[in-house]
Image (cartoon, rainbow, N blue to C red):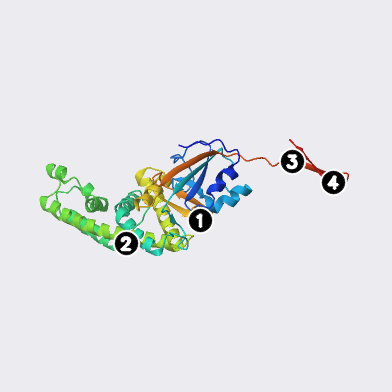
Amino acid sequence: MILNEKYMDIVAALKPYSESNDLFIHFSDLPKLGINPQSDYNTPLGIYAYPLKEIYKEVTNDTVPFASERKWVILFSAHNIHDVSENAENGYTQANWLRDKEILFEKYLPEYKNYLRQQSVEGRLFITDENEKRMGNIALKIMMDDPLIPKFARNMAWAIAALKDGLNYDAMLKENMIKIETVKALEKLHSEYDEHEITFAEDQFKDFIKNCENFGRYTFPCGQLWNVTRTLARILKSNKNSKGPVIWNKIIRSLGYDGFTDKLGEGLIHENEPCQAVFFSTKPIKLLQILPNIRKKPMKYNISYKNGKKVIGYKD
Protein backbone atom coordinates (compact mmCIF):
# COMPACT_ATOMS: atom_id res chain seq x y z
CA MET A 1 0.00 0.00 0.00
CA ILE A 2 1.36 3.40 -0.97
CA LEU A 3 -0.30 6.08 1.13
CA ASN A 4 0.65 9.56 -0.03
CA GLU A 5 -0.73 12.53 1.89
CA LYS A 6 1.67 15.20 0.69
CA TYR A 7 -0.58 16.44 -2.10
CA MET A 8 -3.34 18.83 -1.06
CA ASP A 9 -4.94 18.98 -4.48
CA ILE A 10 -6.16 15.85 -6.28
CA VAL A 11 -6.15 17.52 -9.70
CA ALA A 12 -2.45 18.37 -9.39
CA ALA A 13 -1.64 14.97 -7.90
CA LEU A 14 -3.12 13.10 -10.87
CA LYS A 15 -1.87 15.39 -13.65
CA PRO A 16 1.51 13.63 -14.13
CA TYR A 17 -0.36 10.39 -14.84
CA SER A 18 -3.21 11.80 -16.92
CA GLU A 19 -1.89 10.81 -20.35
CA SER A 20 -1.19 7.17 -19.51
CA ASN A 21 -3.41 4.55 -21.16
CA ASP A 22 -3.36 1.85 -18.49
CA LEU A 23 -4.01 3.84 -15.32
CA PHE A 24 -7.25 3.93 -13.36
CA ILE A 25 -8.70 5.73 -10.34
CA HIS A 26 -11.10 4.36 -7.77
CA PHE A 27 -12.91 6.59 -5.25
CA SER A 28 -13.22 5.07 -1.79
CA ASP A 29 -14.16 5.98 1.77
CA LEU A 30 -11.30 3.79 3.01
CA PRO A 31 -7.60 3.99 2.07
CA LYS A 32 -7.58 0.50 0.54
CA LEU A 33 -8.69 -1.34 -2.58
CA GLY A 34 -10.81 -4.48 -2.63
CA ILE A 35 -14.08 -6.11 -3.65
CA ASN A 36 -17.09 -5.57 -1.40
CA PRO A 37 -18.94 -8.94 -1.31
CA GLN A 38 -22.02 -7.23 0.19
CA SER A 39 -22.61 -4.98 -2.83
CA ASP A 40 -26.30 -4.69 -3.74
CA TYR A 41 -25.84 -3.13 -7.17
CA ASN A 42 -27.28 -4.99 -10.18
CA THR A 43 -23.84 -5.31 -11.72
CA PRO A 44 -21.21 -8.06 -11.58
CA LEU A 45 -19.30 -8.06 -8.32
CA GLY A 46 -16.05 -6.22 -8.80
CA ILE A 47 -13.86 -3.15 -8.33
CA TYR A 48 -15.27 -0.24 -10.31
CA ALA A 49 -12.95 2.51 -11.47
CA TYR A 50 -12.46 5.19 -14.10
CA PRO A 51 -9.79 5.12 -16.84
CA LEU A 52 -7.72 8.14 -15.83
CA LYS A 53 -6.83 9.47 -19.28
CA GLU A 54 -10.49 9.51 -20.34
CA ILE A 55 -11.89 10.88 -17.06
CA TYR A 56 -9.21 13.43 -16.12
CA LYS A 57 -11.11 16.36 -17.63
CA GLU A 58 -14.10 15.50 -15.42
CA VAL A 59 -11.77 15.28 -12.42
CA THR A 60 -10.47 18.75 -13.25
CA ASN A 61 -13.99 20.15 -13.61
CA ASP A 62 -15.30 18.23 -10.60
CA THR A 63 -17.95 16.55 -12.77
CA VAL A 64 -17.09 12.88 -12.24
CA PRO A 65 -20.54 11.21 -12.40
CA PHE A 66 -20.36 8.93 -9.34
CA ALA A 67 -18.48 8.50 -6.04
CA SER A 68 -16.24 11.56 -6.44
CA GLU A 69 -17.23 12.81 -2.98
CA ARG A 70 -15.47 9.92 -1.25
CA LYS A 71 -12.40 10.53 0.90
CA TRP A 72 -9.69 8.73 -1.04
CA VAL A 73 -8.57 8.36 -4.64
CA ILE A 74 -6.76 5.11 -5.36
CA LEU A 75 -4.52 5.11 -8.41
CA PHE A 76 -3.57 1.79 -9.97
CA SER A 77 -2.45 0.23 -13.23
CA ALA A 78 -3.87 -2.73 -15.15
CA HIS A 79 -2.69 -4.07 -18.49
CA ASN A 80 -4.13 -6.19 -21.30
CA ILE A 81 -7.75 -5.60 -20.29
CA HIS A 82 -10.36 -5.99 -23.02
CA ASP A 83 -12.57 -3.02 -23.84
CA VAL A 84 -16.30 -3.59 -24.29
CA SER A 85 -16.27 -1.79 -27.66
CA GLU A 86 -15.01 -3.72 -30.66
CA ASN A 87 -13.85 -0.36 -32.06
CA ALA A 88 -11.52 0.33 -29.13
CA GLU A 89 -7.92 -0.78 -28.70
CA ASN A 90 -7.98 -4.40 -27.50
CA GLY A 91 -11.75 -4.41 -28.06
CA TYR A 92 -13.95 -7.42 -27.51
CA THR A 93 -14.86 -8.77 -30.97
CA GLN A 94 -17.34 -11.13 -32.57
CA ALA A 95 -14.61 -13.79 -32.60
CA ASN A 96 -14.30 -13.44 -28.81
CA TRP A 97 -18.05 -13.85 -28.40
CA LEU A 98 -18.27 -16.93 -30.65
CA ARG A 99 -15.51 -18.55 -28.59
CA ASP A 100 -17.08 -17.58 -25.27
CA LYS A 101 -20.53 -18.75 -26.33
CA GLU A 102 -19.17 -22.26 -26.95
CA ILE A 103 -17.41 -22.28 -23.58
CA LEU A 104 -20.54 -21.08 -21.80
CA PHE A 105 -22.59 -23.83 -23.40
CA GLU A 106 -20.16 -26.56 -22.38
CA LYS A 107 -19.53 -25.24 -18.85
CA TYR A 108 -23.08 -24.36 -17.84
CA LEU A 109 -25.29 -26.90 -19.63
CA PRO A 110 -25.34 -29.23 -16.58
CA GLU A 111 -26.39 -26.36 -14.30
CA TYR A 112 -29.02 -25.20 -16.78
CA LYS A 113 -30.36 -28.77 -16.93
CA ASN A 114 -30.65 -28.77 -13.11
CA TYR A 115 -32.45 -25.43 -13.32
CA LEU A 116 -34.99 -26.85 -15.81
CA ARG A 117 -35.54 -29.90 -13.62
CA GLN A 118 -36.07 -27.74 -10.53
CA GLN A 119 -38.52 -25.51 -12.36
CA SER A 120 -40.45 -28.56 -13.51
CA VAL A 121 -40.59 -30.03 -9.99
CA GLU A 122 -41.83 -26.72 -8.55
CA GLY A 123 -44.48 -26.38 -11.24
CA ARG A 124 -43.08 -23.17 -12.77
CA LEU A 125 -42.11 -24.79 -16.06
CA PHE A 126 -44.68 -26.49 -18.23
CA ILE A 127 -42.95 -28.66 -20.80
CA THR A 128 -45.08 -29.59 -23.80
CA ASP A 129 -42.74 -32.28 -25.01
CA GLU A 130 -44.45 -35.04 -26.98
CA ASN A 131 -41.55 -37.45 -26.55
CA GLU A 132 -41.70 -37.11 -22.76
CA LYS A 133 -45.46 -37.72 -22.79
CA ARG A 134 -44.96 -40.76 -25.00
CA MET A 135 -42.29 -42.23 -22.70
CA GLY A 136 -44.42 -41.50 -19.63
CA ASN A 137 -47.29 -43.47 -21.17
CA ILE A 138 -44.94 -46.37 -21.90
CA ALA A 139 -43.77 -46.39 -18.27
CA LEU A 140 -47.38 -46.35 -17.08
CA LYS A 141 -48.29 -49.30 -19.33
CA ILE A 142 -45.30 -51.32 -18.08
CA MET A 143 -46.44 -50.70 -14.51
CA MET A 144 -50.09 -51.45 -15.26
CA ASP A 145 -49.10 -54.83 -16.72
CA ASP A 146 -47.43 -55.88 -13.46
CA PRO A 147 -50.05 -57.30 -11.06
CA LEU A 148 -47.67 -56.95 -8.11
CA ILE A 149 -47.62 -53.16 -8.26
CA PRO A 150 -50.16 -51.82 -5.73
CA LYS A 151 -53.19 -49.87 -6.89
CA PHE A 152 -51.96 -46.61 -5.32
CA ALA A 153 -48.87 -46.73 -7.56
CA ARG A 154 -50.73 -47.33 -10.81
CA ASN A 155 -50.84 -43.72 -11.99
CA MET A 156 -48.95 -41.21 -14.09
CA ALA A 157 -47.20 -39.63 -11.08
CA TRP A 158 -45.46 -42.91 -10.28
CA ALA A 159 -44.78 -43.53 -13.97
CA ILE A 160 -43.06 -40.15 -14.31
CA ALA A 161 -41.08 -40.85 -11.12
CA ALA A 162 -39.86 -44.11 -12.66
CA LEU A 163 -39.07 -42.31 -15.89
CA LYS A 164 -37.15 -39.36 -14.42
CA ASP A 165 -35.63 -40.31 -11.12
CA GLY A 166 -36.16 -44.04 -10.81
CA LEU A 167 -37.98 -45.64 -7.90
CA ASN A 168 -36.59 -47.48 -4.89
CA TYR A 169 -36.71 -50.81 -6.67
CA ASP A 170 -34.75 -52.66 -3.96
CA ALA A 171 -37.40 -51.81 -1.38
CA MET A 172 -40.23 -52.64 -3.78
CA LEU A 173 -38.69 -56.03 -4.63
CA LYS A 174 -38.18 -56.79 -0.97
CA GLU A 175 -41.86 -56.04 -0.27
CA ASN A 176 -42.92 -58.05 -3.34
CA MET A 177 -44.43 -54.91 -4.89
CA ILE A 178 -42.83 -55.31 -8.33
CA LYS A 179 -41.46 -57.98 -10.67
CA ILE A 180 -37.78 -58.07 -11.55
CA GLU A 181 -38.76 -58.02 -15.25
CA THR A 182 -40.67 -54.77 -14.64
CA VAL A 183 -37.65 -53.25 -12.91
CA LYS A 184 -35.42 -54.07 -15.88
CA ALA A 185 -37.92 -52.60 -18.35
CA LEU A 186 -38.31 -49.39 -16.33
CA GLU A 187 -34.55 -48.99 -15.84
CA LYS A 188 -34.03 -49.31 -19.59
CA LEU A 189 -36.68 -46.68 -20.20
CA HIS A 190 -35.10 -44.44 -17.56
CA SER A 191 -31.75 -44.61 -19.40
CA GLU A 192 -33.47 -43.68 -22.66
CA TYR A 193 -35.17 -40.76 -20.94
CA ASP A 194 -31.85 -39.48 -19.55
CA GLU A 195 -30.53 -39.24 -23.10
CA HIS A 196 -33.72 -37.50 -24.17
CA GLU A 197 -33.52 -35.06 -21.24
CA ILE A 198 -29.96 -34.08 -22.18
CA THR A 199 -31.06 -33.34 -25.76
CA PHE A 200 -34.05 -31.37 -24.51
CA ALA A 201 -31.87 -29.33 -22.12
CA GLU A 202 -29.37 -28.65 -24.93
CA ASP A 203 -32.14 -27.32 -27.17
CA GLN A 204 -33.57 -25.19 -24.36
CA PHE A 205 -30.14 -23.76 -23.47
CA LYS A 206 -29.42 -22.90 -27.11
CA ASP A 207 -32.78 -21.10 -27.30
CA PHE A 208 -32.01 -19.27 -24.05
CA ILE A 209 -28.68 -17.98 -25.38
CA LYS A 210 -30.22 -17.01 -28.72
CA ASN A 211 -33.04 -15.07 -27.02
CA CYS A 212 -30.55 -13.21 -24.83
CA GLU A 213 -28.56 -12.29 -27.93
CA ASN A 214 -31.60 -11.09 -29.86
CA PHE A 215 -33.42 -9.16 -27.15
CA GLY A 216 -30.61 -7.54 -25.18
CA ARG A 217 -30.29 -3.76 -25.10
CA TYR A 218 -26.80 -3.85 -26.59
CA THR A 219 -26.28 -5.84 -29.79
CA PHE A 220 -22.49 -5.51 -30.19
CA PRO A 221 -20.43 -8.59 -29.18
CA CYS A 222 -19.61 -7.64 -25.58
CA GLY A 223 -23.22 -6.51 -25.11
CA GLN A 224 -24.29 -10.04 -26.00
CA LEU A 225 -21.78 -11.48 -23.55
CA TRP A 226 -23.09 -9.12 -20.87
CA ASN A 227 -26.76 -9.96 -21.40
CA VAL A 228 -26.27 -13.73 -21.61
CA THR A 229 -24.06 -13.91 -18.50
CA ARG A 230 -26.28 -11.52 -16.52
CA THR A 231 -29.45 -13.49 -17.30
CA LEU A 232 -27.72 -16.82 -16.69
CA ALA A 233 -26.52 -15.57 -13.29
CA ARG A 234 -30.07 -14.58 -12.37
CA ILE A 235 -31.51 -18.01 -13.05
CA LEU A 236 -28.61 -19.97 -11.56
CA LYS A 237 -28.67 -18.07 -8.26
CA SER A 238 -31.66 -20.19 -7.14
CA ASN A 239 -29.62 -23.37 -7.72
CA LYS A 240 -26.60 -22.01 -5.85
CA ASN A 241 -28.46 -20.09 -3.12
CA SER A 242 -26.24 -17.11 -3.84
CA LYS A 243 -26.51 -13.55 -5.10
CA GLY A 244 -26.75 -12.88 -8.82
CA PRO A 245 -23.83 -10.38 -8.90
CA VAL A 246 -21.54 -12.95 -7.23
CA ILE A 247 -22.45 -15.65 -9.75
CA TRP A 248 -22.17 -13.14 -12.60
CA ASN A 249 -18.60 -12.37 -11.50
CA LYS A 250 -17.72 -16.08 -11.40
CA ILE A 251 -19.21 -16.77 -14.83
CA ILE A 252 -17.19 -14.02 -16.51
CA ARG A 253 -13.99 -15.05 -14.71
CA SER A 254 -14.59 -18.64 -15.82
CA LEU A 255 -14.26 -17.36 -19.39
CA GLY A 256 -10.81 -15.97 -18.59
CA TYR A 257 -11.57 -12.25 -18.10
CA ASP A 258 -10.22 -10.29 -15.12
CA GLY A 259 -11.95 -7.08 -16.13
CA PHE A 260 -13.30 -4.81 -18.84
CA THR A 261 -12.93 -1.16 -19.73
CA ASP A 262 -15.46 1.08 -21.47
CA LYS A 263 -13.19 3.89 -22.65
CA LEU A 264 -15.40 4.97 -25.54
CA GLY A 265 -18.41 5.41 -23.27
CA GLU A 266 -20.73 2.72 -24.64
CA GLY A 267 -22.49 2.63 -21.25
CA LEU A 268 -22.40 -1.16 -21.04
CA ILE A 269 -20.85 -1.44 -17.58
CA HIS A 270 -23.33 1.14 -16.31
CA GLU A 271 -25.37 3.61 -18.31
CA ASN A 272 -25.06 6.33 -15.66
CA GLU A 273 -21.25 6.22 -15.78
CA PRO A 274 -20.68 5.34 -19.43
CA CYS A 275 -16.89 5.71 -19.32
CA GLN A 276 -15.52 3.40 -16.64
CA ALA A 277 -13.93 0.02 -15.93
CA VAL A 278 -14.64 -3.03 -13.81
CA PHE A 279 -12.20 -5.59 -12.41
CA PHE A 280 -13.49 -8.96 -11.24
CA SER A 281 -10.47 -9.65 -9.05
CA THR A 282 -7.32 -7.88 -7.86
CA LYS A 283 -5.17 -10.16 -10.02
CA PRO A 284 -4.43 -7.66 -12.85
CA ILE A 285 -4.14 -4.63 -10.53
CA LYS A 286 -0.90 -2.96 -9.43
CA LEU A 287 -1.45 -0.34 -6.74
CA LEU A 288 0.43 2.93 -7.30
CA GLN A 289 -0.89 5.69 -5.03
CA ILE A 290 -3.54 6.23 -2.38
CA LEU A 291 -4.30 9.95 -2.32
CA PRO A 292 -6.54 12.11 -0.15
CA ASN A 293 -9.40 13.44 -2.25
CA ILE A 294 -8.82 17.13 -1.47
CA ARG A 295 -9.18 20.11 -3.75
CA LYS A 296 -7.59 23.53 -3.36
CA LYS A 297 -10.27 26.10 -2.78
CA PRO A 298 -10.22 28.92 -5.35
CA MET A 299 -8.88 32.20 -4.06
CA LYS A 300 -11.54 34.86 -3.50
CA TYR A 301 -10.62 38.43 -4.36
CA ASN A 302 -12.01 41.90 -5.01
CA ILE A 303 -10.92 44.19 -7.81
CA SER A 304 -10.89 47.94 -7.23
CA TYR A 305 -9.16 50.93 -8.79
CA LYS A 306 -7.01 53.52 -7.03
CA ASN A 307 -5.48 56.47 -8.84
CA GLY A 308 -6.43 54.77 -12.11
CA LYS A 309 -4.62 51.54 -11.26
CA LYS A 310 -6.18 48.10 -10.74
CA VAL A 311 -5.91 46.85 -7.15
CA ILE A 312 -6.61 43.21 -6.31
CA GLY A 313 -7.53 42.46 -2.72
CA TYR A 314 -7.55 38.82 -1.65
CA LYS A 315 -9.93 37.42 0.97
CA ASP A 316 -9.42 34.46 3.30
Separation of marks 2 and 3 at Cα, in angstroms: 70 Å
Q: How many marks?
A: 4
**Place of residue 278 in the rendered image (x, y in percent of width and height, measured from the top left):** 46, 49
Q: Residue furthest left?
A: 180
**At 74% across and 41% down in the image, what residue appears?**
300
> The residue tagged with tag 2: helix, strand or loop?
helix
User: Circle 2 sits on which residue?
Assistant: 203
Label 2 environment density (alpha carbons within 10 Å; few <14, some 14–19, many ≥20): few
Q: Identify the mark nearer the N-term, 2 or 3.
A: 2
- The residue that mark 3 highlights is 300
Chain-order first, disc 3 or disc 1? 1
The image's mark for residue 147 is none
Q: Nearer the viewer, residue 178 or 296?
A: 296
Q: Is residue 79 above or below residue 203?
A: above
Residue toward you, 9 or 220: 9
Residue 203 appearing in the image: yes
Q: Amino acid at mark 4?
A: Lys
At which x and y percent is residue 168? 18, 45
Q: Which numbered disc, 1 or 4, marks the residue that appears first in the sequence?
A: 1
Foreground tag (3 vs 4): 4
For label 1, the crowd category at 10 Å Cα-Cα, with few meaning under 14, some 14 to 19 and many 20 or more, is: many
User: Residue visible at 45% across and 42% down?
Assistant: 287
Structural distance between the alpha carbons of marks 4 and 2: 85 Å
Q: What residue is at 50 percent from the left and 56 percent from the top?
A: 263
Front-lying residue, 17 or 246: 17
Spatial separation of the CA atoms under disc 3 and disc 1: 36 Å
Q: Is residue 302 left or right of residue 80?
A: right
Q: Position of residue 102 (x, y in %)?
A: 32, 60
The quadrant in which the C terminus is found is top right
